[in-house]
Amino acid sequence: GDGVFKYYSSGEWKKSSSGKSVPIINPTTRQPHFKVQACTQEEVNKLIEEAKTAQKSWAKTPLWKRAELLHKAAALLKEHKVPIAECLVKEIAKPAKDAATEAVRSGDLVSYCAEEGVRVLGEGKFMVSDSFPGNERTKYCLTAKIPLGVILAIPPFNYPVNLAVSKIAPALIAGNSIVLKPPTQGAVAALHMVHCFHLAGFPKGLISCVTGRGSEIGDFLTMHPMVNCIRKQSNDLVELYLHCPDVLICGLNIFCCCFTGGDTGIAISKKAGMIPLQMELGGKDACIILDDADLDLAAANIVKGGFSYSGQRCTAVKVVLVMESVANALVEKVKAKVAKLTVGLPEDDSDITPVVTESSANFIEGLVVDAKQKGATFCQEYRREGNLIWPLLLDNVRPDMRIAWEEPFGPVLPVIRITSVEEGIHHCNASNFGLQGCVFTRDISKAILISDAMETGTVQINSAPARGPDHFPFQGLKDSGIGSQGITNSINMMTKIKTTVINLP
Ligand code: G3H
């Protein structure tokens, strides 16, 4: 055809009546690689209406049948891992092996969701009235979990497939329908994932995938009166809200914008009105290293946590807070490991690949320049070619530097030397973010006390922050988000409680 990927509505692949398309820029070549349809508001209206209708009969479809279809989709996702991974390599420069892992992890997530769903949703609660003062045993209360309705899912560029299915699968097993707006970069990988659900044979209209410019369909989607729940992840919000005058956007990538994640989240909450929201809005995950830590273990986790997918993970280690007494030894060990990272093409499965956009690379460079001017120690020379930024460890970072607080979403990691554990905890808690954090020590009692003191959704002891395994609860405090994810929590989030009371004579 004309080389423009079609959008998915009414169980069919369609061209938009706009006749327009949106290009997807390959981060490596900085040239357009794919094109997707620029959908119109009328097209969005039609698919949301269909989602509403399809949801009604889907909610009546037996739970085991819903699970069966999800298992089929999971198997198809794994079978299609090669083409999906190829898209991720071209659209978001994800290293080849990580791209394949994303597809497989997504299949596993969908199967687990189906299994968990039949148990979580297959059970209700039974209560009797005489446990409350003044009541006889004359009322029986039956509690069930019922679907919300139409779920709008907006995943970010860094996991266009995995962070889409982490919303789609819980929504579907719970009897909801799904409208997916993938990030522009990663949209074709997402369309391919949707194709797997199409092949699995879900009813027409139950799942749709709309592509296009945020300015045309962004607010329109999030404020649509027929949407019953919004699941968002941060990056694409910028695209959606760029045109929105009451939201401060200071960069092209919300992950990069200190304080903006929260502002955008609040703006969305206001616009969404009374519908449930689940949002993940970035992080500044701290890694606290005590003087009794296993420094080899800590260094390995700092490099993995800080530099995998070139630091473009909300859960990446984004600041190292190390006790002065072990700082020299730790920095040497991290430097040695950074020197071994390969830098280059995602196709070659390099460790460090080009960051997602030129504006993201410019933003990262701004943080590096600021740190240089304010006297940080550069453990490597700063090097950039196009969107490719070589891994950089910045030692002796001080709180007056932007990198101490802001989220680079790139392969640049600051080290702050601390003289007490309290200083580390204070830095962590002074951040407006509160996603995850980690602590390295051989003293489990200290680790637990530090975990209790850190104002983050999760604290990892002796390992880098990470969302997975995907059935663990995953949540951000403060500006890092609203609601808790993880398979069981997400299924519950996609439901509301309905009670029926039997009144005995
Ligand atoms: O970027 C945000 C993701 O939820 C992080 O997932 O810890 O598996 O990389 P991850």
Image (cartoon, grey):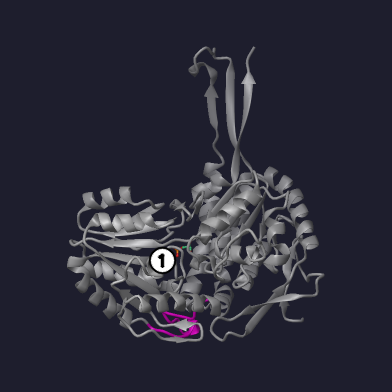
Query: Which residue is rendered at x = 26% and y = 54% of the image?
Result: 422
Which of the 4 quarters of the picture holds residue 254? bottom right
Nearer the observer, 218 or 300:
218
Quadrant where the N terminus lies? bottom right
Residue 462 location in percent, x, y?
28, 60
- 296 magenta-colored: no
Residue type at the position of mark 1: Ala
List x then y, in percent, for residue 375. Answer: 32, 77
Can you say which quadrant of the picture contains the C terminus?
Answer: top right
Q: Would residue 148 be found to the left or right of residue 121 on screen?
A: right
Residue 172 seen by the camera:
no
* Residue 225, horizontal then vertical, whole percent: 73, 49
Q: Is mark 1 within 8 Å of ligand 1?
A: yes
Categorize mark 1 by other alpha carbons within 10 Å: few (<14), some (14-19), many (20+).
many
Tell me the residue at 52%/61% (across/down): 260
Residue 354 counted in the magenta span: yes
Depth check: give the residue in front, 378 or 117.
378
Mark 1 lies on residue: 316
Per the image, label 1 sits on a secondary structure element best described as loop
Residues 279 and 370: in front is: 370
Q: How many discs mark residues in the rendered view?
A: 1
- Residue closest to the eye, 55 or 307: 307
Left or right of 490? Residue 209 is right
Residue at 46% from the left image edge and 77% from the top image edge: 366
Describe residue 105's horizontal placement relative to residue 35 as left or right: left
**Can the viewer see residue 48?**
yes
**In the image, 209: left or right of 76?**
right
Predominant secondary structure, magenta span: loop
Residue beneath the point at 20% across and 73% down: 328
Residue 298 placement (x, y as % from top left):
27, 67
Residue farthest to the right? 17
Magenta-highlighted residues: 342-356
